[in-house]
Image (spheres, rainbow, N blue to C red):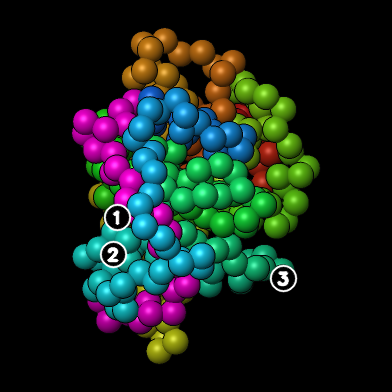
Amino acid sequence: MTFNPEADVSGNTARRKGRGAVVAGAGGVGLLGIIALIAGPLLGIDLTGLLGGSGGGGTGSEPAEGSVIENCLTGQDANENVDCRVASSQLALDGYWEDHVENYRPPQLIIVDGATASSCGTASNAVGPFYCPPDETVYIDPTFFQLMQQQFGASAGNLAQLYIVGHEWGHHIQYITGDMERYPNNGTGPDSNGVRIELQADCYAGAWIGQMEGEKDKNGVPYLQPSTEAERQDALNAAFTVGDDNIQEQSSGTVNPESFTHGSSTQRQFWFASGYQNGLDSCSQPLTVSGDEL
């Protein structure tokens, strides 16, 4: 899915924080980093200590409020630059959720450049995208998309990237609506609350993507163009890539469902597709259906 080139995305409030840290690439974090970023965020665990020096220490200083994302004014900028693409998705996400959640309040969006502090631990290129409830903030280091491509062979194209942002926004919705409190962390396993919360966030991302082209800028121009079949397959590929069973198979060659924190690849694809096809009406189900229906 691409942005309409003429769309006005200058209203995004995303900020960049962190500087001077090593950027993880093909020879950087490796598979352990992927596992850390998948397992840690929901539980509020900072796993960067497992990753050696790849999180890096910053040099120089950064404004406390962060810096603006430069050269991010139009949809064309978002199509050409991944930082701008992530920042601009905020506008379509906020517009969608304002229409569907009473008294919606938007999260802050931080584009992580190397590493920065959060109330949930270090946000870095080692930990990857996460939502921190105490901060009501989504932290995303766009180099995560490179890791998905380099370490797992994922396509990680534009719509896959928006799926990941939409997933993290889904956690914010769970927080402000009270679902996180109603379904607190109760350990790991295929029927755990952690898995249910993650699958609901996948459903939320799918529901948003199914209607995302309906959100418009102040001039009435849709931010985004309708997705193509190839782009939807790209998003499904991303959902498969971050499934617990795929992560475990890639890392150790064995799969242990009792240690699941996010759901299997099949489950993640199913609930993303359910949200896309059926909208928000289907997204309460991951929290309430029996374990064998997940």
Residue named by callout 3: 103
At label 2, counting other C-alpha atoms closer than 10 Å, the crowd grade (few under 14, some 14-19, many 20 or more) is: many
Is disc 2 in contact with disc 1, using a CB cutoff of under 8 Å? Answer: yes
What's the residue at 41%, 48% (across, down)? Answer: 115
Residue 265: image location, x then y, percent: 43, 30
Q: Amino acid at mark 2?
A: Thr
| Amino acid at pointer 3 | Asn
In terms of secondary structure, where does tag 1 sit?
Answer: helix
| Prevailing SS of the magenta stretch | loop
Q: Can you say whether 274 is above or below 153 in the image?
A: below
- Earlier in the chain: of badge 2 and badge 3, it is 2
Residue type beneath disc 1: Asn
Q: Which sits earlier in the primary sequence, circle 2 or circle 1?
A: 2
Residue with the mark numbered 1: 158
Q: Is residue 187 left or right of residue 274?
A: right
Report, in whole angstroms, how far the alpha carbon at label 2 lies from the one at label 1.
7 Å
Give residue 72's quadrant in the image: bottom left
Left or right of residue 15: residue 24 = left
The answer, for residue 4, to whether it is visible in the render is no
Circle 2 or circle 3, nearest the eye: 3
Q: Can residue 290 be found in the magenta stretch?
A: no
